[in-house]
Image: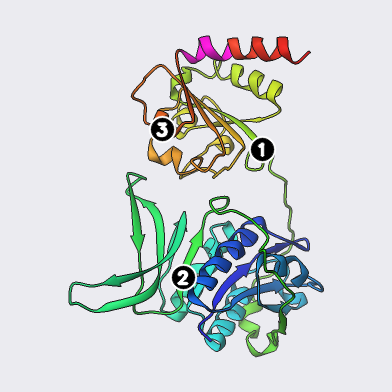
């Protein structure tokens, strides 16, 4: 059918945010290509799950509902996904760059001989002309940082279908589709795809803990870099975050130096955030970091280097020592919040 498919992750009856982000992006791609957007949901007790997907532009929702499909297991989920894709023949298939997506996507692409681009930060539609003069229309531009984040690579797949990519959480907006309407539900006949060999792995015990540190959804993030100088100096960022009602983030250099926990790392090898306010304290602003926060609504940089790259994307740049500026900010907000 040459439509666009999004694999939608479900945990405890709730669709993952990254899947809704992909549906939002997939809808815009489908409109660009004049095709339909389809969602694939695999699990158990999925009755009514389509109502979560229609508002984000899904035209067709394929539901594979079977007790053997929950919780997630590699082999059965792979068999069902591969089977559906072989029948439906999508031109594009998108997965979240989550533990599930990173496990499932490569298996599906290998089985379909399609290739896959991992950890994309942007997706666009465009044309390509190769060195032999062959022209290709409406390819998926799979865009991601490469070589340690020092360049941005655009990867295309002119010859194989589906064009497959995993996309990092948080890099795309999650927005309801203005023209959303109820679409079509297709029940997947799971028995066609599953075999006894798919069920050789059994989950004896499963224990999940919520993230103790989760900065992704915070509307205000105060991040510190190597320029903070020490773990002790990082404490002023927590003081400022407490006053503003925000969370503390960090650059990779700060995490590598032991100033704070990896769960707070923002950037290519950390989390991607889109807060209303991002205050970068002592962060130089290399692409490895800015790839994870440059979509913030407002960016304030505090840095004693006027040539720091972060100043180029900041809405406001405060030149000065962070250990001088931040305590003054704390004092000001305490005084004016009474």
Q: Residue at x 77, y 61 (%)?
A: 12
**Residue placed under numbered mark 3 in the picture:** 285
Asked where in the image residue 112 lies, by quadrant, the reply is bottom left
**Residue placed under numbered mark 2 in the picture:** 164
Disc 1 and disc 2: Cα gap in Å? 30 Å
Q: Position of residue 124 (x, y in %)?
A: 44, 63
Q: Which residues are magenta?
A: 321-327
Q: What secondary structure is marked by label 3?
A: loop
Residue 106 vs residue 220: left or right?
left
Q: Residue at x 69, y 88 (%)?
A: 191
Disc 3 and disc 2: Cα gap in Å? 30 Å
Give the class, few, some or many, for how many residues have Cα within 10 Å of label 1's Cα (few <14, many ≥20). Answer: some
State whether the magenta stretch is mostly helix, strand or loop: helix
**Residue placed under numbered mark 1 in the picture:** 218
Vertical placement of residue 87 versus 182, above or below? below
Residue 9: assigned label: none
């Amino acid at each position: 059918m040459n439509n666009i498919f999004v694999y939608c992750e479900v945990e405890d009856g709730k669709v993952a945010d990254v899947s809704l982000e992909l549906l939002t992006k997939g809808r815009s791609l489908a409109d660009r290509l004049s095709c339909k957007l389809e969602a694939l949901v695999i699990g158990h007790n999925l009755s009514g799950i389509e109502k979560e997907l229609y508002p984000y532009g899904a035209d067709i929702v394929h539901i594979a509902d079977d007790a053997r499909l929950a919780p997630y297991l590699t082999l059965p989920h792979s068999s069902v996904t591969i089977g559906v894709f072989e029948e439906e023949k999508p031109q594009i298939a998108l997965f979240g760059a989550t533990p599930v997506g990173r496990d499932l996507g490569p298996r599906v692409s290998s089985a379909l001989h399609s290739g896959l681009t991992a950890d994309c930060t942007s997706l666009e539609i465009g044309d390509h002309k190769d060195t032999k003069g062959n022209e290709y229309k409406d390819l998926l531009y799979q865009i991601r940082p490469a070589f340690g984040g020092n360049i941005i690579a655009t990867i295309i797949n002119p010859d194989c279908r589906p064009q497959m990519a995993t996309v990092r959480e948080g890099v795309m907006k999650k927005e309801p589709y203005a023209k959303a309407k109820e679409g079509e539900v297709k029940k997947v006949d799971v028995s066609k795809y599953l075999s006894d060999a798919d069920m050789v792995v059994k989950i004896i015990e499963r224990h999940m803990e919520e993230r103790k540190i989760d900065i992704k959804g915070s509307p205000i993030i105060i991040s510190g870099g190597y320029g903070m100088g020490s773990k002790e100096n990082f404490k002023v960022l927590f003081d400022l975050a407490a006053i503003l009602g925000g969370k503390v983030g960090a650059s990779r250099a700060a995490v590598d130096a032991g100033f704070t926990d990896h769960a707070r790392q923002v950037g290519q090898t950390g989390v991607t955030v889109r807060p209303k306010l991002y205050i970068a304290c002592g962060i130089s602003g290399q692409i490895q970091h800015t790839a994870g926060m440059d979509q913030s609504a407002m960016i304030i940089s505090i840095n004693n280097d006027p040539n720091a790259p972060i100043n180029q994307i900041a809405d406001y740049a405060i030149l000065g020592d962070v250990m001088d500026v931040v305590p003054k900010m704390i004092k000001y907000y305490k005084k004016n919040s009474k």
